[in-house]
Image (spheres, coloured by chain):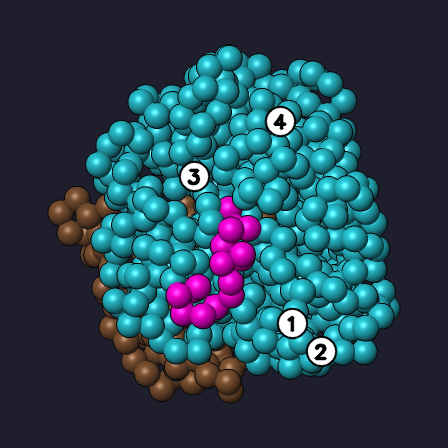
Chain colours: A brown, B cyan
Amino acid sequence: MKYEFFEHTADAKFRAYGKNLEECFSNAAEAMISIMIKPETVEPKITKNISVNGTDLKSLLYNFLEELLFLIDAEFFIMHRVASIKINPMGKKYMLNATIEGDKLSEKYSTTGDVKAVTYNEMEVKENYVQVVVDI
Amino acid sequence: MDIELKKLSNITWQIPKSGEMKVPAVVFASEKLLEKIKQDDTLKQLRNVACLKGILKQAMVMPDAHQGYGFPIGGVAAFDMQDGVISPGGVGYDINCGVRLLRTDWNFSQVMDKRKDLLNEIYKEVPVGVGKGGITKLSRDILMEILKKGSKWALEQGYGTKADLDRTEENGSMSDADPHTVSARALARGMPQLGTLGSGNHFVEIQKVDRIYNPEIAKAFGIDREGQVMVMIHCGSRGLGHQIASDYIKEMEDKYGFAHLPDRELVNAPIQSELGEKYYKAMCCAINYAFANRQMIEHWTRDVFGKVMGTFEGMNQVYDVCHNLAKYEKHEIDGEIRKVCIHRKGATRSFGPGREEIPEVYRKIGQPVLIPGSMGTASYLLVGTKEAELATFGSTAHGAGRVESRSRALHELRGEDVARDLEAKNITIKGASWKGIAEEAPECYKDIDEVVRVSHEAGIGKMVARLVPLGVLKG
């Protein structure tokens, strides 16, 4: 299982699993996008390279997911999948580089809901899973 | 976790001051609502708020309270201007998510056959759902002007009338807004989205007056009979506001850290600090963006009624209130009038007669308070009170408040069935997606009638009229 959703009164809470941090982060991105659209229905027409950093692993995850929301609002870019992802320590910080495949949102796609923001509420970053609550 | 609650009355409960708490905390709720509130982290989050530096008198939640992040939803807290803090988590991500109400001259029988046309036409004018841009992408310079001026910009562009601005909280424009405090990322999210409804619980609703509780005040607010058609608009500052919240959470973490806080989303800055002031000015920009947004959506809604009904004469704005913000206001504390920084996160300002912030036409009566229901349930028009000014820094509830998670709703409900149930109640619904409709099903929310009853009984917002939906355009 890549990810599963849990009960949370106001928001969407999910846990994304993986063999390592990179896989957990990648599956978390897919879980979050799945609230808005079925990622598998998005055509991989555009490739974007993104890099974010974080003061700790939680802020790295927060900033990574927020970047995907930013791309939707500012560039109408919706993710199909994380094609590659690498996380490296950088001094006291962490750096994430990823290649994202996706497409421009248009009338041909029907979306199913919005994610307003990523939150730190109940966030967990463990070796084999991450947990996130997003504001929807 | 068990949190001790002391019963103060049938509808007020206190968490006495203990441990790190600087002040006690108070819950406004009936026993029925309290049972729901106890089921999530609301009380724990409320107690955390009472621990923040410079908090005055008491931390509070309104009857529609539920768990949020950092502050609970329904939270109200005031902070000392010298020693206190300002917190993005005390405002929320959707800065100035708010509600606007229009009255009309029509009787509901005149619009019943035209509801579908009206909703379809509004749907064409007002983009709804995810990734739907506005009519035109704004330039950076124009966006900066909007952030500075709010509804004033909209009025200058021909959206609406001066009377709309007069009947908007803060006249639709926060003068402390400084667009230079807004990041390039927030601007980039804001440029394509002005004039869009967004998603989630946001809506444009055609309603009818179902009951009038106070005919005299209702009349002053433009309502003279049951069956009268009303229009309600519920939306906020979109991606721009979300990004401002997120930007300043990060900046405050970097500067002040969060290790000492019980919850990372309680991160804050002193009001009297460079960063605290910067956040306040940026938040004011998001408030202005949301005001301009609702002003434009109102304008297009009037246009649609003009087209479908032949005229939009009489579609006057009753009021526009904010549900998520922090503001400097004057309040009486221990017999002394003090300027404080009030946070309302999922709460409505509820000022009584006489306050200078209330437009002149309503000043002798009190401020109109708008409480939207969930999709398909009643909404309420209330009036602000002196009691609220003394008890809750002039605040009351903001909606029904969720009881059920969206994930469970999706598990148990299908959007098609929810829409059919609403049609059976003679409510027409149009939405961007079936899934969105299922998530916002009436079953997922607290009983709005009960929430409003508690507000009325506590005297923090008095019932004026009950409004029920005829047609809903859901974001």
* Labels 2, 3: one chain: yes
Instruction: Nearest to the eye among marks 2 and 3: give it.
Output: 2
Give the residue drawn at x 48%, y 68%: B159
Give the residue drawn at x 23%, y 53%: B180
* Labels 3, 4: one chain: yes
Number of other residues with Cα within 10 Å of mark 2, as a class: few under 14, some 14 to 19, many 20 or more: some
Give the residue drawn at x 39%, y 81%: A104
Lateral position of residue B376 relative to residue A129, left or right: right
The answer to whether residue B120 of the structure is visible from this angle is no
Q: Which structural element holds mark 1?
A: loop
- In terms of sequence position, does the residue under pointer 2 or pointer 3 come before the other? 2
Question: Bounds of the magenta span?
Answer: B154-169
Which numbered disc covers residue B312? 1
Q: Is residue B40 magenta?
A: no
Locate residue B65, reporting x and y percent. 62, 38
Which numbered disc covers residue B386? 4
Q: At label 4, which amino acid type do we have?
A: Lys
Front residue of B16/B132: it is: B132
Q: At label 2, which amino acid type do we have?
A: Met
Locate residue B322, reporting x and y percent. 52, 47
Tell me: residue B237, above or below residue A111: above
Between the C-alphas of marks 3 and 4, the distance is 21 Å
Determine which quarter of the picture holds residue B119.
Answer: bottom right
- In terms of sequence position, does the residue under pointer 2 or pointer 4 come before the other? 2
The answer to whether residue B191 of the structure is visible from this angle is yes
Residue denoted by label 3:
B326
Lateral position of residue B85 relative to residue B275, left or right: right
Between the C-alphas of marks 2 and 4, the distance is 40 Å
Q: Quadrant of the N terminus of chain B?
A: top right
Residue denoted by label 2:
B309
- In terms of sequence position, does the residue under pointer 3 or pointer 4 come before the other? 3
Q: Is residue B167 magenta?
A: yes
